Image (cartoon, rainbow, N blue to C red):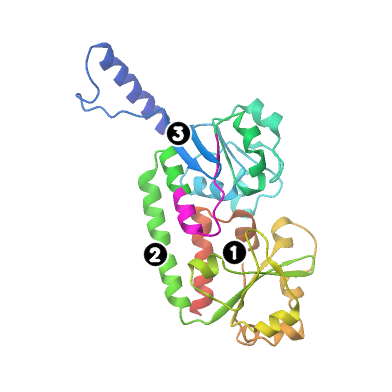
Amino acid sequence: MAHVRLAVLSAAAAATLALSGCGGSSEAAGEPTTAASVTIDHAQGTTEVPVDPQNVFTFDLGALDTLDALGVDVAGVPQGTLPAQLSDYEGGDTANIGSMKEPDFEAIAAAEPDLIIISGRVADSYDQLSEIAPTIDLSVDAADPIASFTEHTEALGRIFDLEDEVTERLANLQTGISETKEAAASAGNGLVLLTSAGEVTAYGSGSRFGLIHDVLGVEPAADVKSEGTHGEAVSFEYIADVNPAHLFVIDRDAAVGEAGAAGAAVLDNELVNGTDAVKNDAVTYLDSASWYLIGYGLNNLDAMVSAVNEAVAA
């Protein structure tokens, strides 16, 4: 799809030059003019990005999910921890540009990308990557995730000349959010838990998983002390005392491929089993890769919203 659009843009440019050479005006002749680049505001500043770049690298799996949803070719991604939803980018013609936290600067420079997309895990590498190619940081603001995600997605629509497609997809997503929020209004409160190496961490409003409370309207079961990517370490006694109507569980070990007890096994004890959530079969084990690794992408966010909708509508 990207190659077809490039051909169209090239043809338009050639036509404009031909008209200019004859002393004519492209506007007078009704020919569209196409900018060579667009200005993108992002988490670390403002960057001039080429229109419809062909050699695109991304460390942000949410952006990869969005580009995949829009039919845009991505040439380089970090290998080794790609979830099943994005397994088409494992090996083959897709360049390995490092890990989720450590870019391979030499490999990236040698491949001469037209655009590099990053987010929180490699945000500290922004300056080095910017020396190689135009780089944009699409980290989602946990304090206002949907507005942030919408802005980022619209920016990608501008870059790849897919604004109409982006508008339609975002409208459909907003419909799902509204339906979920309506169902959540009468569903009771909820607690979001992440299990890792046998330990349990809770996440609340304003956190990396605050989507459940802040956007989808599930009432927080407790005032969890969590900020950004970090949650609050909690005990089984804490969960019992909070006694949530719903439990939403993310198994980090499963997401990153580490050995360890499954989230269900970690929480299978007398204290947790005494909660209303367990007694009323209102425990939702969220897709770990979807929530922990991918996050805010067009396809993935739709799946995240649907998972919560199913839980609160039951």
Decide: few, some or many residues near mark 2? Use Cα within 10 Å; few <14, some 14-19, many ≥20.
few
Q: Nearer the viewer, mark 2 or mark 1?
A: 1
Give left or right: position of 19 versus 66: left
- Disc assigned to residue 209: 1
Q: Earlier in the sequence, mark 2 or mark 1?
A: 2
Check if residue 146 falls in the magenta segment.
yes
Check if residue 244 falls in the magenta segment.
no
Q: Earlier in the sequence, mark 3 or mark 2?
A: 3
- Disc assigned to residue 52: 3
- The answer for how far apart the CA atoms under marks 3 and 1 are is 32 Å
Residues drawn in magenta: 135-151
Q: Position of residue 148 (x, y in %)?
A: 48, 53
Decide: few, some or many residues near mark 1? Use Cα within 10 Å; few <14, some 14-19, many ≥20.
many
The residue that mark 2 highlights is 175
Residue 39 against residue 224 in the figure, above or below: above
Where is residue 251, by image quadrant?
bottom right
Q: Position of residue 134 (x, y in %)?
A: 54, 32
Q: Are marks 3 and 2 in contact (CB under 8 Å)?
A: no
Quadrant where the N terminus lies?
A: top left
Residue at 74% from the left image edge and 85% from the top image edge: 271
Q: Nearer the viewer, mark 3 or mark 1?
A: 1
Q: Nearer the viewer, residue 43 or 10?
A: 43
Residue 270 against residue 86 in the figure, above or below: below
The amino acid type found where label 2 is placed reads Thr
Q: Nearer the viewer, residue 207 or 190?
A: 207
Residue 299 against residue 312 in the figure, above or below: above
